[in-house]
Image: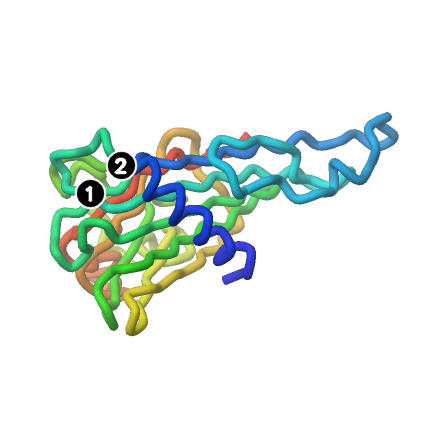
């Protein structure tokens, strides 16, 4: 968990109270060609992640481009989907708890992270990237996103349902109900096939026949994850 990531909480808290709506930041990198006339300093400066909808270059000249997505919101009941990208179906993810999901795509790999505040205390959530957006029903988010798809669905085969072939973000909250997790992969999503992050009721199993299972779906965050270019 980088300090930058936590630093954004101050901003996202203010944003959430003021508007009550999803704050989605999509930052599209524009790589500066070698020898370009543009001065190096602005291109090398970090993108402004502290304001919703801001966009700007985040790559240094010559480095692989970086695409960033941030979704920050507060959980609402599933009958109010217009108010938030984050829906909760169960008291173990309280209405009003804050969530931030981020994706950084760099070259052919990516980093996905989640952070929550004001969730249940000392609680372990099983968390994964799912294929479809959140909906009124917990199952609307569909199956887990898999890099190599298991021909047998639902997938409980640990050769497919594992944290290298799927994005798992299990975490345990502290005494304040805060928690976070990071997943790094050497691949990126297929465009349009990864649409949400689901919080389940317990830690994710890795056992054969139960691999990838983490119990009931307690809450869901819709995220417009980027696919490969
Ligand atoms: Cu899941």
Separation of residues labelled 1 and 2 (CA atoms): 6 Å
Q: Which numbered disc, 1 or 2, marks the residue that appears first in the sequence?
A: 1
Q: Is residue 152 left or right of residue 181?
A: left
* Picture coordinates of residue 125, whole percent (x, y): 25, 62
Residue placed at 28% from the left, 46% from the top? 74
Mark number displayed over residue 181: none
For label 1, count other residues whose C-alpha is less than 10 Å away and answer few (under 14), some (14-19) or many (20+): many
> Image quarter for residue 91?
bottom left
What is the secondary structure assignment of the residue under circle 2?
loop
* Picture coordinates of residue 217, whole percent (x, y): 17, 51
Towards the viewer: 156 or 128:
128
Residue placed at 38% from the left, 29% from the top? 192
* Picture coordinates of residue 177, whole percent (x, y): 28, 65
> Image quarter for residue 208?
bottom left
Towards the viewer: 141 or 113:
113
Ligand 1 has an atom within 8 Å of the beta carbon of the residue at disc 1: no
* Picture coordinates of residue 214, whole percent (x, y): 20, 59
Residue placed at 39% from the left, 61% from the top? 180
Question: Where the C terminus falls, by quadrant?
Answer: top right
Confirm whether residue 25 shows in the render.
Answer: yes
Confirm whether residue 195 shows in the render.
Answer: no
> Image quarter for residue 92?
bottom left
The residue labelled by disc 1 is: 76
Q: Is residue 38 left or right of residue 177?
A: right
Q: Are marks 1 and 2 in contact (CB under 8 Å)?
A: yes
The residue labelled by disc 2 is: 84
């Amino acid at each position: 968990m980088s300090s930058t990531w936590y630093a954004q909480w101050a901003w996202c808290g203010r944003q959430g109270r003021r508007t009550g709506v999803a704050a989605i930041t999509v930052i599209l990198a524009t790589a500066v060609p070698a020898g370009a006339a543009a001065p190096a300093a602005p291109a090398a400066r970090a993108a402004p992640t502290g304001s919703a909808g801001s966009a700007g270059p985040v790559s240094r000249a010559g480095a692989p481009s970086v695409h960033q997505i941030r979704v920050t919101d507060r959980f609402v009941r599933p009958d109010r989907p217009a108010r938030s990208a984050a829906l909760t179906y169960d008291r173990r993810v309280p209405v009003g708890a804050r969530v931030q999901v981020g994706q950084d795509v760099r070259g052919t790999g990516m980093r996905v992270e989640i952070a929550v505040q004001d969730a249940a205390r000392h609680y372990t959530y099983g968390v994964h990237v799912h294929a479809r957006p959140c909906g009124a029903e917990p199952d609307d988010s569909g199956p887990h996103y898999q890099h190599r798809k298991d021909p047998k669905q639902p997938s409980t085969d640990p050769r497919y349902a594992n944290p290298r072939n799927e994005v798992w973000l299990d975490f345990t909250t502290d005494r304040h109900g805060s928690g976070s997790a990071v997943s790094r992969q050497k691949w990126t999503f297929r465009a349009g096939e990864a649409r949400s992050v689901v919080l389940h009721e317990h830690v994710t199993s890795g056992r054969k026949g139960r691999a990838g299972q983490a119990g009931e779906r307690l809450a869901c965050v819709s995220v417009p994850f980027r696919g490969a270019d």
